[in-house]
Image: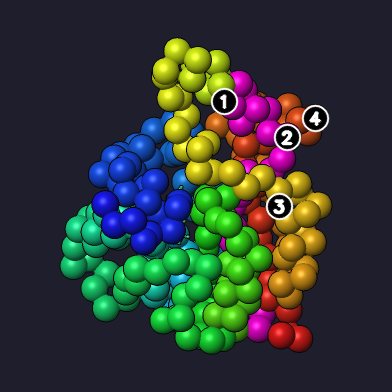
Amino acid sequence: MPSGLPRGARFHEEIAAGWTAGYARGAFARRLELIRVILTRHVRPGDSWVDLGCGSGVLCRELLALGASVVAVDGSPRMLSQAQERMGSEYAGRVSWIQSDVQSIDAVKNGAFDGVLCSSVIEYLDRPDALLKEVARILRPGGVLVISLPPTLSVVRALQKGIRAFMSMFGNAKFAYLSVSRLEISPRAIDRLLQEAGFLVIRSTKYDPVLPRALLRLVRPALLVVEARKLNRL
Ligand SMILES: C[S@@+](CC[C@H](N)C(=O)[O-])C[C@H]1O[C@@H](n2cnc3c(N)ncnc32)[C@H](O)[C@@H]1O
């Protein structure tokens, strides 16, 4: 496996082959449904979108189905080949693929895009501010960012961390993603980071794979999906 890859991309090389299958049911299928509803609010036919950290391309398909053209970026060569293989010639001419670190995407043009989707990627990065700076650079003024991330104090993540620590005493590595998915940001801090990067937060939606929706009024979810708009001043 190439050692020069970003940390988060290197981890996903190992699980690329099974990534799409994970969306068939359960928590991933419900997360996909939520993101589909959110994208429907923002994507218009003929739009140009970037899917940052596109993985095996499941969410690229959603953007394409809504009529956008898509530049799909990921740091994992295996994820990108999975995505390309599965897409085949469907949507040919409307999707292009770039292997790059999302913290520095020189190949993507300034101010050229109507929207950026970045689903479950920022938590794998050492420089989240660099990612947001890149997003602000490539979006047109008024363009939309849809980004998901784990907030601090998530009950489910705390439980997973506990199980991981306990099982590690028996040499069993549970929830391996937690070794690389390290960044957790409080809802207030993500709003601040987005404001500093030149965005106005439109909406933040809570998602949890386990806890019922009613409980999410009292406790933090595993995931926040934030919709934000790039301000005109940049
Ligand atoms: C949890 S997966 C999410 C994939 C996809 N967005 C989805 O929701 O199905 C995270 C993805 O981010 C990519 N990734 C992580 N760190 C990266 C980095 N620094 N640069 C580019 N891609 C990165 C991984 O290779 C992986 O495909």
> Is residue 101 magenta-colored?
no
Q: For the residue with label 1, is its CB less than 8 Å from the closest atom of ligand 1?
A: no
Please tell me which of labels 4 and 1 falls first in the chain: 1
Q: Residues within 10 Å of mark 3 (few under 14, many from 20)?
A: some
Give the Cα distance between marks 2 and 1: 12 Å
For the point 40% across and 69% down, which residue is it? 100
Query: Relative to 83, is 43 above or below?
Result: below
Give the Cα distance between marks 3 and 2: 16 Å
Q: Please give the residue where the numbered disc 4 appears in the rendered image.
A: 218
Query: For the residue labelled by badge 1, is the local secondary structure a helix, a strand or a loop?
Result: helix
Q: Residues within 10 Å of mark 4 (few under 14, many from 20)?
A: few
Query: Relative to 30, is 140 above or below?
Result: below
Q: Please give the residue where the numbered disc 1 appears in the rendered image.
A: 160
Range drawn in magenta: 141-162
For the point 22% across and 65% down, which residue is it? 90
Q: Quadrant of the C terminus?
A: bottom right
Residue type pointed to by label 4 = Leu
